[in-house]
Amino acid sequence: MSQVPLNYLNATKGLKSWLFTLDHKRIGIMYLMFIAISFGLGGFFALALRLELLNPKELLFTAKQYNQLFTLHGAVMVFLFIVPSIPASLGNFLLPLQLGAKDVAFPRLNLASLYIYVFGGLFCVYSMFSGAVDTGWTFYTPYSIDTSTSVISMTLGAFILGFSSILTGVNFIVTIHKMRAPGMTWFRMPLMVWSLYATAIIQVLATPVLAITLLLLILERTMGIGIFNPALGGDPVLFQHFFWFYSHPAVYIMILPAMGVISELVTAFCRKNIFGYKLVAFSSLAIAIISFFVWGHHLFVSGQSDYAAMIFSLLTYLVAIPSAVKVFNWIATMYRGSIQIKAPFLYFLAFLFLFSIGGFTGIMLGALSLDVHLHDTYFVVAHFHYVMMGGTVMAFIGGLHYWWPKMFGRMYSEFWAFIAWAFVMVGFNMVFFTQFILGAKGMPRRYYSYLDQFQPLHAFSTFGSWVMAVGFILMAFYLMDSLLNGKKAPDNPWGALTLEWQTQSPPLTENFIETPVVTRGPYDFGQEKRS
């Protein structure tokens, strides 16, 4: 190591030094850049959709264009943004730091996973300009077999993106097993690490199923082999089983890292040890395991047997238990804590409120009798967004604000962070709580036109999307401004105890001058002076 340690941002400069870097922190920053672009693109499609739905008749787009926008919004948000959002960006940056390691186990594999992600994303972008897909982001057969749009290039892009996810998962598992600092036992690991570990297990085991499913769909379109096409003796419902066997565990690829972020936020800003550390840690593994057995609740009206439906309904209730454990433990951690209201904690509160609504409505949809009436209505759209955006996105933004000073060495404006949070929260609930009402009244999802009686609620939801967009634009402005004009960040602005806060901001190229020796848990507030 050099006698004058350099931080990773200034170690070597120039584009080439970034493109060929093996530093996990730079790779995490590059992931963050591409993920932010994907979020902006997917958000633009969402605003266009809501603008079209301002009126029950054609306003800006034809029915076909609406279906294409709807598909692109879903595909970009799911495959390019929300699945890799926390593991690939924050996870890549933080995992070795929180373990006291110098890097991930396989740095070259880590860089390869980034380029595979970019390569897969380029296929998805290409498909937008070569006959954008109009199947919906789930690519349901038999329509995805027959449509003339670019299903092959879009699904091939998702197929390639899956390899990036698998390689990242393998890297994280090996890093956690083999690269922990001296004294870093399993039960001294931060809960963020536990969540990334559980996520990596799902990435490695579930993602190949999606890859095979999409490959079969491509073969079906190009060779007509009759796996999903009923005209050739295939079964279109089989595609749904294959797709959701991956995609429901993938929900937890999205939400488990978010839960890890939330565990870090609640302890740091309540100045308290997490309540029930082992329960929270093991609940992550429980979610990962149970998530493989609940895919059938997406197929309650597909014609599966009553017994299968009852079993999947029961398992849906079961997977809610470890999620509820986390929520109750976070609330218990807040009790009598020394709470500091900072921007990251605001997003913790947003997560707690919105994710709880999403989880409760998920239990409602797990009830067979109710799901039959609410299936494929806007109630499902609202539930999905309260979990994914109210959960994962709020946690991602909270984590970004929490670790921003560590990543870039600059502080942002707390005032503007509060204003942006308020716009996002108000706008989000205007958009999606309204959709619970729409769904309960019978408004089906994915429809281009609708009855006049639904127009006021659709208009209110659209107005909410504009409010939320203002919040995100403000957020982008003050975060970018902080890089140029923000105050220099101290090494540990929040007074947190996990290892990433024990190095300089931004971190050294090799993370630590000396390998840290861990002698206590990650949240032992009150004991730091005695250790």
Image (spheres, grey):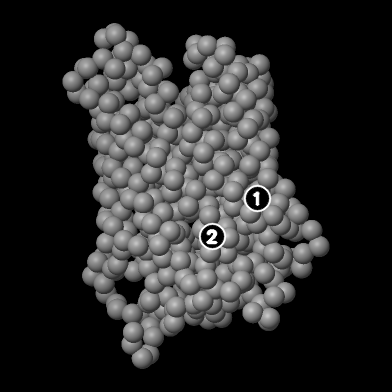
Most foreground residue, 330 or 429: 330
**Residue 31: percent from the left, percent from the top?**
38, 58
The residue under label 1 is which amino acid type? Answer: Leu
Q: Which mark is in front, 2 or 1?
A: 2
Q: Determine whether the residue tagged by mark 1 lies in a helix, strand or loop.
A: helix
Against 230, is 267 above or below?
below
Which part of the image, by quadrant, shows the N terminus? bottom left
- Give the image quarter of residue 216: top left
Residue pushed farthest bottom?
Answer: 3
Q: Which mark, by number, is residue 186? A: 2
Q: Can residue 149 be seen at all in this image of the molecule?
A: no
Q: Determine whether the residue tagged by mark 2 lies in a helix, strand or loop.
A: helix
**Residue 275: percent from the left, percent from the top?**
71, 57
Most foreground residue, 75 or 238: 238
Q: Are the residues tagged 2 and 1 within 8 Å (C-beta)?
A: no
Looking at marks 2 and 1 on the same chain, the residue that comes earlier in the sequence is marked by 2
Most foreground residue, 516 or 87: 516
